[in-house]
Image (cartoon, rainbow, N blue to C red):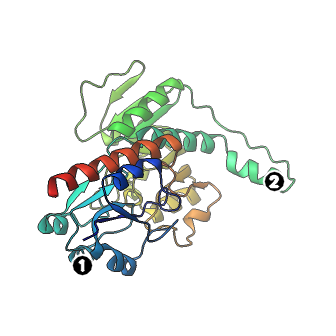
Amino acid sequence: MTCRIAVTPRSLSQGGHPALAALEAAGYDLLFPTPGRQPTREEQLQFLPTCVGYLAGVEPITREVLAAARGLKVISRNGVGVDSVDLTAAAEQGVAVETTAGANAQGVAELAIALMLAGQRHIPPQDAALKVDRWQRIEGREVAGRTLGVVGCGQIGRRVVQLGLGLGMSVRAFDAWPDPRFTPAGDFSYTTMRGLLARSDAVTLHCPPAERPLIDKDAIAAMRPGAYLVNTARSSLVDDGAVLEALVGGRLAGYATDVYDQEPPAPQELLHHPRVITTPHIGGYTTESVERATRAAVENLLRVLTAAF
């Protein structure tokens, strides 16, 4: 029987990647079922039953899909998030779920800082104005001397801390399990979530999702008036309605997001607000991050499949 591996991350599914050649060299046939886009549930039900491996993107992988894929041995994500995978069903079926922790950390961290700077200097609206021949200058704010709040101090969050310190900012971090060994040079300290919100001029999210939004109406009320919010982690961390209300009321200076409940997102008022910056989930979409994540995902596939066969 031919052993097939499905490859669906959008960064890999159109032209492949040199790292994928290691899978072919090991005797596996590669399947690119939906070039350039996420597969639907119906498409997964068609191609996964013939596969032993799944190099997956961010698409949902449900119990129904897994039940149809009886020969599947491993799901390898070219990223760190697995909240789109039914982990209970995968464990029951004996399907290993592997991630590439840290592979895209630098790319996501740099994007978070870029979004913060773009918001503080109002780059998108001024660029848009000049493109229609309108001279529009908007006074911005410098970040040096201001306070950056980093929620979640894992591999991405620690890089954001270092970048913020490099810009001359004071940095306060909240983490459920703070690492006392992380002591970067500069004005840095861990604090409580409440303390972070009250003190920070900009807040950036780098933590896993919870049962309810972390940034809701109460959290926004606790933030410093005129603060800026950045989310490159998970859309479920933020209550969109509360953020829109805060933007309209002037409590938040702006919001930037790279993550959505669905991709592409459905039209909504928040995403069209003039003080919101949106990017199409590009945090880990850099040449370097794709390279690191792909090679790690391939290594994970080969390790698990070699043990299985």
Please name the residue shown 24% across and 42% down the image.
176
| Residue type at the position of mark 2 | Lys
Decide: few, some or many residues near mark 2? Use Cα within 10 Å; few <14, some 14-19, many ≥20. few
Of 118 and 60, which appears nearest the observer?
60
Which corner quadrant holds the C terminus?
bottom left
The answer to which of marks 2 and 1 sits earlier in the sequence is: 1
- On the rendered structure, is 5 left or right of 117? left
Depicted 309 relative to depicted 303: above or below? below
Q: Is residue 13 left or right of residue 193?
A: right
Q: Could you tell me if the residues under marks 2 and 1 are in contact, i.e. CB atoms within 8 Å? A: no
**Residue 150: which quarter of the image?**
top left
Q: Between 71 and 64, which is closer to the camera in this rendering?
A: 71
Amino acid type, residue under disc 1 in the picture: Ala
* Residue 29 point in image, percent of width and height: 36, 63
Q: Quadrant of residue 66?
A: bottom left
Q: Residue at x 24, y 30 (%)?
A: 179
Q: Which mark is residue 223?
A: none
**Element on which disc 1 rests:** helix
- Residue lying farthest to the right in this orientation: 133
Q: Which mark is residue 131?
A: 2
Q: Nearer the viewer, residue 193 or 6?
A: 6
The percent coordinates of residue 79 (x first, y second) are 37, 51
Q: Residue at x 36, y 49 (%)?
A: 22
Residue for badge 1: 68
How far from the left and from the top, in percent, is residue 212? 30, 61
Asked if residue 85 lies left or right of residue 118, the reply is left
Helix, strand or loop at mark 2? helix
Label 1 neighbour load within 10 Å: few <14, some 14-19, many 20+: some
Residue 155 picture quarter? top left
